[in-house]
Structures are given as C-alpha cells and as structure tokens.
Image: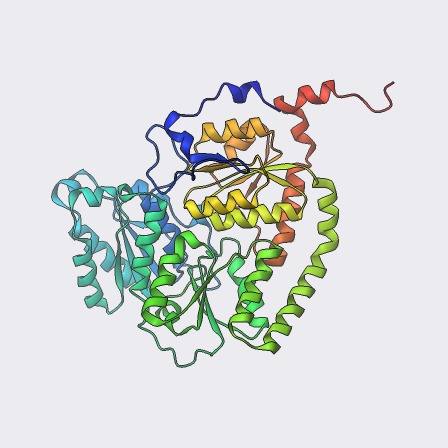
Amino acid sequence: MNSPAAASISILPDRRDSIARAGEAGNAVACDRGSLAGSVTQRACAFCGSRVVLYPIADALHLVHGPIGCAAYTWDIRGAQSSGPQLFRNSFSTDLQEMDVIYGGEKKLGRALRELIRRHQPKAAFVYSTCIVGLIGDDVSAVCRELSAEFSIPVIPVASEGFKGTKKDGYQAACDAAYRLVGTGDTRDISDRSINLLGDFNIAGESWIIRGYFERLGIQVVATLTGDGRVDDIRRCHGAKLNLVQCSGSMTSLAKRLERDHGIPFQRVSFFGIEDMSAALYGVATFFEDPLLREKTSELVREEIERLMPELREIRTALEGKKAAVYVGGAFKAFSLVRALRTIGMRTAIVGTQTGDRDDYDQLRAMCEPGTLIVDDSNPLELAKFCLEQDVDLFIGGVKERPIAYKLGIGFCDHNHERKEALAGYVGMLNFAREVYASVMSPVWNYTPRRALRLRTAPRENEE
C-alpha cells in the first residue's frame, strides 16, 4: 500500500544516507553523528543519557545542578524499580536563577549538597552538570571533592552538559562517573561463579527476573548496573568473573574498562525474546566450563519454553503476516525485537535506532527480510511516512513515538520508558506477545481513517 499521505511527506536531502533498505545494495548507513538541524530528531541529549544510566542506583543521591526544568527528567520518566531504598525517586535540583548565572552557582551547589546529605544520609551522591553550568564555568568537580572530604562519602560529578552531544555521549559520561566507585569494595565473599548484569535498568522488574534465572543455576549476581543498583555492590563489582552487557550502547565502555583494569571478560547479550534469553544463559554456562551447569541450563530453558509455547502458538496463528515498525534506543534491543516478532509470526517492515553504529546496521540488513527499511536517528515526519508506506499494524517504540502511532491509527507497544509489564526473560516474552496481540487485533483500528475505507469497500461474507 502506497498511501497518498505518505507520498506527500518528503525526506530532507541530508537525511537520505541515514536510510537504507535490507536486501538492496548501497552504502553503509550514515550514523554516529550529530542530529540534522531542523529535523526535530527523536534522539535525546547527553544529560538525558547520563540520567538514564545512573538514576536507577537506588541508595544514591541524584542532584541536578542547573535550571529547574532539567530536573523534570527524573525517576517517573524512566520508572526503574527498587527492592529497597527509594531515595532515587526524588528529583533534587539547585534551581539556578538569573543571578546564579551571573555570579556562579558553586556556593548554591555546596549548600544544597550539605542539606541533602545531612537529611538523607546517602551512600554516594551524583551531581549532574547541565548546559547552563557548562556555559558559566562552575567548578563542579572542586565542590564535589570538598563535600566528599567533609562527609566521607563519594560525591561524584557527572560531566553531562546537554550540548556535549547525544544520548550516547551521556552514556559515556555516566560510565565514567560510575567507574569511580569500582574497585573500592570488599570482594572476599564473591563466588568463582559470579557475574555482573550491565545495562539493564529494571524498568518493570526485569533485573529481578534475570537475577532469578541465574540464581536458579547457582550463579552469583554481584551487581546490577544500574537497575535496582546499590553503591556498595558497584564498589565490589570488580570481583565478578564475567560481565553480561545487555544494553551495548550504554555499558560497553564500562565493560571494556573492567576488562582492561580488572581482567573481567564480557559477553554482549540480550534478555528479550526466547532465542536471545536462551543464548545468554547458554553463553554463561559455556564460559564456566562445567558440564553439570550446562545440564541445569538446558533443563531451565526447556521448562520455561514448555510453559509458554502453547499460548504463543495461538497468538502466532492470529498475528501471522502482520507488519511492525520498530524504533528504539539501542541496536541490541532492535535485534531482539526482530527475532521476537518473527517468533509470533510478524514481519519487521521498519527498524531504526537512536544510537546504533555501522556494524549494527549491517547486521540488521543481514537479519531482516528484503525490503525492510533501516533508519538511524529518525524524526517524526520520517517515521510517519514510513509507517504509512509500509502499512504497518504495530509500532514498537518509546514515549516519544506513541503519539505518532496513535495519530496514524496504528497499534502501539511501549518497549522503553513508561511500561509497567516486564518484557525480558521467558515470562517477558509471553507478556510481550500478549500485549502485541491485544494491540494489533483490537477492532478499533478498523475505524481509523486509513482503514475505514478498506473496511467499507471490502466484500462482505455471503455476498454473491
């Protein structure tokens, strides 16, 4: 279906090399560059990226040094869950005003930290620099050193000025900050079979699900960075024997530093979908080179798949041949979603990411069916055009993509920030399939403008 509305939406000339099609020859997808001015990109800033990574550390104090508006990006946007401390759910800001911009905000930052540390007794404090702080030149590091000495806790500056780059640059700033905790804790009670989970943010309890699988196998999870994170666990995470990197864009740099400085190898994994969840478990079992562990892993995988397959088969029958658009932050999530959609009978017609690199897009080209559109750092107009052209039945994305889908009369599945259902692990695959089924098969979409004409002109049953 080539929609007239889609034909009327044009692509900016400078964006064309960031769009490719699977199965067709062409240059590599242009990526790893700043968003095109005027395209109103879906990509976020460096400050956003740093908050995504560090905010789930539940027993730390998180203070935004900047105008009050920046503090709006807080726990309730990401929604990470904690099994204990709730300090991270509070959004604190120095609320810089005009006079602070003129005379500097260092004294105000010091006063804020003193008040908050005395009141909340955090295990550590992270201070996030914003654009305005980068412009006026406050020495945030000096204030943090002073307060750290005064209270004998880590007070860590996060170089997260939004104008420094994209969300991916914020990931790097967050990893640099978190790494200052690593290597300062006691590792004596850490098992020879131990792992860290990097890059899962426990948005809807996923870290608990994944931790449960590994604990059933007798593998100790030392730290989750940063979902349901604890400062003391991060301090001693250098004692683990293996790192599993779930969100490669946010945590690969930290995993590489742990490998370089502490000799801990890492595996890139995904916990979304049956194939990837199983591969992650088998990868860990293979790493520890224990035949008994391999048997226990096979038994766990078999039990979990047998539990969900009967319902998945029914859902697949209903969804066979439906088409989906996927636009997410990291490429590893995109890979998993393509496979998970295939498991329930759907084809990925469009797939894009905010932080993918050339190797990621080459892999997407190889794994997607011919004709699938592949796009880096897209914008709302492009996404609308592609969804109409491909006549998709479902859009999988985050909070910024939801209005695009609903305005076009397309079912939507939130796979990022605001969801309440866990979508990782085997139980997550079943939750995902149920949500997709409910969204795609709802009769309401037959009465949206783009479908209504087709419904009225389709031949009726028993019509001669």
Give the residue drawn at x 43%, y 25%. Answer: 11
Where in the figure is residue 212, as x and y percent of width and height? 56, 67
Residue located 47% across and 79% down the image: 192
Image position of 112 with respect to 327: above or below: below
Residue at 70 percent of width and 40 percent of height: 320
Quick check: 363 above or below 224? Answer: above
Q: Is residue 418 left or right of residue 148?
A: right
Of 425 and 301, the residue lying toward us: 301
Q: Nearer the viewer, residue 275 or 89?
A: 275
Q: How is the image coloured?
A: rainbow
Q: Report x, y in % for residue 238.
A: 37, 71
Front residue of 136/382: it is: 382
Q: List the single residue furthest toward the front.
A: 25
Residue 432 in the image: state x and y as whole percent: 61, 48
**Residue 319 in view, yes or no:** yes
- Quadrant assignment for the C terminus: top right
Residue at (51% x, 44% y) in the render: 364
Determine if residue 416 is in view: no
Image quarter of the N terminus: top right
71 relative to 439 in the view: left or right? left
* Residue 178, percent from left and from top: 33, 61
- Residue at the extreme bottom of the image, as rendered: 188
How many numbered marks, from 0 up?
0
